[in-house]
Image (spheres, coloured by chain):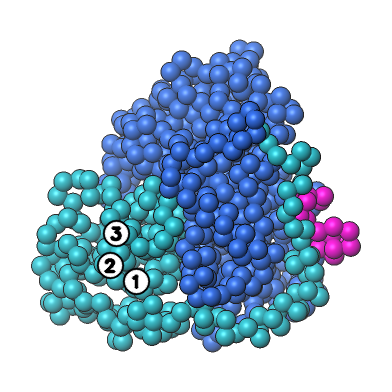
Amino acid sequence: MKGRLALASAQLSVNAAGIMATRAQTLYEKIWDAHVVERRDDGTCLVYIDRHLVHEVTSPQAFEGLRASGRPVRRPELTLAVPDHNLPTTPRVDAAGQLLPIADPESAQQLDALRRNTAEFGIDYIDATAAEQGIVHVVGPELGFTLPGTTLVCGDSHTSAHGALGALAFGIGTSEVEHVLATQTLLLSPSKTMEVRVDGTLGFGVSAKDVILAIIGKIGAAGGTGHVIEYTGEVIRALSVEGRLTIANMSIEGGARAGLIAPDETTFAYLKGRPMAPQGEDWERAVAWWRTLATDPGATYDQVVTLHASDIAPALTWGTSPEDVVPITGAVPAPDSFADPAKREAAQKSLDYMGLAPGTRMQDVAIQHVFIGSCTNSRIEDLRAAAAVADGRRVADGVRAMVVPGSGLVKRQAEAEGLDRVFTAAGFEWREPGCSMCLAMNPDKVPPGERCASTSNRNFVGRQGPGARTHLVSPAMAAAAAVTGRLSDVRDLMGGGTR
Amino acid sequence: MQPVTRVEGRAYPWGAKNIDTDVIIPAHWLKTITRSGLGRGAFETVRKQPGNIFDDPRYVGAPILIAGDNFGCGSSREHAAWALADMGIRAVIAPSFSDIFSGNAFKNGIVPVVLPQAAIDRLLVAAQDGEVTVDLETMTATTAYQDRFPFHLDAFRRQCLMEGLDEVGLTLARDTAISKFEGAMARHRPWIEGRSRYAGVAVEGGRRT
Ligand code: SF4
């Protein structure tokens, strides 16, 4: 009976291209079908791209290509550009409102190229000095540029973040950036689907970051290869859009092309009234369609992985792959504890690089840097969580801690709530928005051999600077590390703290 | 793009797994605004180590790289493919590739050849003193020792590689279909193209200090 009902409801779904679906479908399949322009015999499809985000690092060669072939941008209104990777996070204008120069000539050149290219091709560009500037993956959702049921791409692997709102969003290379600019389409093969279901209710002190670290620890850094993950279950449903963005953001660290979360009332409430979101009658029509997107009962995935919230603790990484995850109560693993010889060798290399001995308790590891920021964890909720731990405490001696809001709008909101004062009173640096210490492309770097508790998404060798050692953590755990000077269990500082 | 039908020559018998794009080309090399010259930064951290495979006189300039699982994982930077191309690599053989990297490789005339681990193990030995050939016509990888490993390539991508086709040009030829889709979209999802443009006025004050 249940199956027949499910089939009936699936048969009623009409996708946005006006095509009637005849079988139970997943969220991914529905979005895919609504965007197929043409299907080839070999199964690859020409897929329409609704939204395109551009930043300064991966776009110059794409514009260069257009210019060389004399091609225009097909639909400039579907693209939005904002600089983020190269920008220093120090003030951008002086007290008199004069623009401050960017010291690194190569960064300045890339930033200039973005400004010139977007002007030449008629693309909306958010300048480094604008209130809305920020990390491209924070800006898109925040302005309502990112919408459920859209296809969204950007020349950046963490584009997967936008899947938190139910957009099929993924990173592309520069040639594909050029392809989208010229044709508003991409030639793609369908991905396999993987459901990652997280049941239960998160425990005290456990955040969205801990959930995604636990997921990657479970499936492995290549576990999602060839798949689009759909995150489901009570834990995901209970998360805010901010928390969902943290989860979908790191889909790529689990090897997946994209991560999706079905749009629901939480999503609609988040988007309503955002400057670039649909309004009036368009809003009503859009929501009506978005409601039909959730995976039909009875639809199947190529793979299903389940986790239970009661097994997820505040977590962090010990090595140089995002799959190297342990709970904060755990210890550095011994390389011979891995059955796979390749993993054993990789673990040994990781430990040498990280300067850690097997068996060391994670909580005994001292850190010198704390970075709260990046497109994974720089939204207002992240800053609130970190500030709650920092409030009334002091950054430990010998620790440099910085907070980098994900966008100018987040920064303003935080300042309106007084979070900046909480951070600065505790000895954190409060900086301008950008990618900052997430990757070693701008002046914010971790010096060689030094150790950083970071809310970013990659702990690769050299990611935060040559020789830098990274432990991925949640914002609250990062703040806890800042005030204790070592990797710490945030639960010890919550509620029963020294305040 | 130059057509590629066959890649023949020495191969770096590396075999390393999970080589991410930060290893292929570190982030500080991404500040360029052109596609060329990145070969100098390719595998920079690996090349700092004495006795590394890329500076081994037996392999310098080899057109083929043999790697382990999950080659090209990490960021979407196409600079990884440009760097490999600039150092003369035309084919990478590995048990698996990251999705984004293999797309980028194709678009830059680099053949990502997927072979099972057993074949890789054999190639790692054979490549130490002999040449390897990747043939797109027959879709095989062969060695000087009569080894012969068939591989699979997506038919369209294979054609693009072999004929050196420009993908943007090919898609632009489908203009009528794209316009037709846009027409349907305007009816069914009008909010997609009707978005509010950015005017810098989303927030009071507009500018930040
Ligand atoms: S914050 Fe980090 S991961 Fe996110 S877009 Fe910037 S560099 Fe990439």
* The residue stretch that appears in magenta: A271-288
Kind of residue indicated by mark 2: Ile
The structure residue drawn at horizontal position 76% and vertical position 38%, both measured from the top left corner, is: B205
Viewer-nearest of discs 1 and 3: 3
Colour in which chain B is drawn? cyan
Circle 2 is placed at which residue position? B89
B163 relative to B187 in the view: left or right: left
Q: Residues within 10 Å of mark 2 (few under 14, many from 20)?
A: many
Disc 2 chain ID: B
Q: Which mark is residue B110?
A: 1
Pinpoint residue B135: horizontal percent, then vertical percent: 27, 81
Q: Which mark is residue A117?
A: none
Which of the chains is blue?
A: A
Which quadrant of the rendered structure holds the C terminus of chain A? top right
Q: Which residue type does callout 1 highlight?
A: Ile
Residue holding disc 3: B39
Q: Chain of mark 1?
A: B
- Please rate how many residues cluster around mark 1, counting C-alpha atoms within 10 Å: few if below 14, some from 14 to 19, many from 20: many
Q: Compared with residue A293, is residue A81 higher up or lower down, i.e. above or below?
A: above
Q: Mark 3: give few (<14), some (14-19) or many (20+) Cα within 10 Å.
A: many
> A18 or B77, which lies in front?
B77
- Magenta stretch encompasses residue B85: no
